[in-house]
Image (tube, helix red, strand yellow):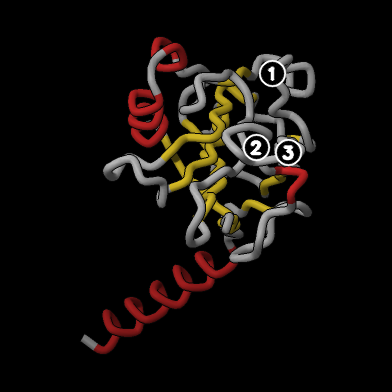
Amino acid sequence: MKRSLSSFFALAAFAAADAGGAQAFELKSPDIAEGKTIDMKHVYDSFGCTGGNLSPELSWSEPPAGTKSFAVLAHDPDAPTGGAGFWHWLVVDIPPDVRSLKQDAGAASGKNLPAGAHQLENDFGDKSYGGPCPPPGKPHRYVFTVYALKVDKLGDAAHGRTAIAGFTINANALAKASITGLFGRK
């Protein structure tokens, strides 16, 4: 019994040390600070908003083993849509060797995206980045999330609606990391 308890504690210590050494998948941005107001250069330029509509620069750490592609999504869970929120940006099929999207990667032309990546239609109806533009009132949260995926392409879901893309992305996610910025209008 004494030996088995010693073995158990040794294995537990080894596992804890191993887990402690593993680096968590992390998303960073020089443009979006956690819990802080999003700059006007990233705000939508329509629907009563007058921002620059530039997608923010994003970068992420080394993903888990088995990652074959990435997806980046931007979502406003506070939008008054009856619970579905509002999708501002969906980028899929980002190659597994890519670790960042530069500012304005969300341009409608797609010219600033990594080769092979493409944008899905957001809830504004555009295949591009659509910045924050909530109705007047309290600030909304804008959640930018990178997903490490176990598939290299999304297939038919890449041409579907946001709910189908979201379902497929979440079903194939090995890890995800987020940053949440805020924006409100009076």
Residue 64 left/right relative to 163: right
- Quarter where residue 93 is shown: top right
Image position of 108 with respect to 54: above or below: above
**Residue drawn at x 36%, y 27% as measured from the top left:** 168
Which residue position is annotated with label 3?
A: 100
- Quarter where residue 159 is shown: top left
Secondary structure under the numbered disc 1 in the rendered image: loop
| Type of amino acid at the residue the image marks with label 3 | Ser
Rounded to the nearest angstrom, the CA distance separating label 1 from label 3 is 18 Å
Tell me where residue 149 appears, x and y as whole percent: 49, 32
Marks 1 & 2, CB-CB < 8 Å contact: no
Front residue of 166 and 60 = 166
| Type of amino acid at the residue the image marks with label 2 | Tyr
| Type of amino acid at the residue the image marks with label 1 | Ala
Front residue of 66 and 85 = 85
Rounded to the nearest angstrom, the CA distance separating label 3 from label 2 is 22 Å
Rounded to the nearest angstrom, the CA distance separating label 1 from label 2 is 13 Å
Q: Earlier in the sequence, mark 3 or mark 2?
A: 2
**Residue drawn at x 40%, y 16% as measured from the top left:** 157
Which residue position is annotated with label 1?
A: 108
Q: Residues within 10 Å of mark 3 (few under 14, many from 20)?
A: some
